[in-house]
Amino acid sequence: QRTGRKPKGKKLIERELAAKGIQTEVIVNEKELARQAVEKKLDVWKTLSHFEQKKKISEFLYRRGFDWDAIGSIVDEVMGKE
């Protein structure tokens, strides 16, 4: 349920669950969630330079709890499209 509206990374979801005392493994396709999260923001960042877009995407995904492997993969994928 937590991944529906505002996709978050596995680490952040695990921290939220641990804070509530829930011990469980979260199985999500992190790359797909990261892509969904970024797609919503791309229009807002389209006027920025290539460097600034990469920075915004990376920082945004990091704050959402995605790991650097997923972030790097999505940055490469999204910036390669344009």
Image (cartoon, grey):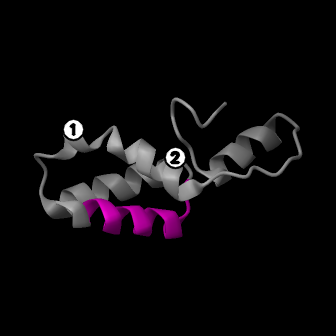
Quadrant of res 49 = bottom left
Main SS, magenta region, reads helix
Which secondary structure lies at badge 1? helix
Mark 1 residue type: Val
Vertical placement of residue 23 versus 71, above or below: above
In the visual, does 68 lie left or right of 3?
left
Which secondary structure lies at badge 2? loop
- In the rendered image, residue 73, in percent from the top left (x then y), is placed at 42, 68
Quarter of the image for the N terminus: give it: top right
Residue toward you, 41 or 16 = 41
Which residue in the protein does label 2 denote? 64
Vertical placement of residue 2 versus 32, above or below: above
Mark 2 residue type: Arg
Q: Does the magenta stretch include residue 72?
A: yes
Tell me the tag on residue 31.
none
Residue toward you, 16 or 1 = 1
Q: Which of marks 2 and 1 is nearer the N terminus?
A: 1
Residue in view at x 10 percent, y 46 percent: 47
Residue in view at x 13 percent, y 50 percent: 48
- In the rendered image, residue 34, in percent from the top left (x then y), is placed at 47, 51
- In the rendered image, residue 41, in percent from the top left (x then y), is placed at 30, 40
In the visual, does 81 lie left or right of 21?
left
Quadrant of res 40 = top left
How far apart are labels 2 and 1 at the CA level? 17 Å
Quarter of the image for the C terminus: give it: bottom left
Numbered range of the magenta stretch? 66-79
Tell me the tag on residue 44.
1
Vertical placement of residue 1 versus 17, above or below: above
Callouts 2 and 1 close, C-beta under 8 Å: no
Residue in view at x 60 percent, y 54 percent: 29
Crowd rating for badge 1 (residues with CA inside 10 Å; few <14, some 14–19, many 20+): few
Crowd rating for badge 2 (residues with CA inside 10 Å; few <14, some 14–19, many 20+): some
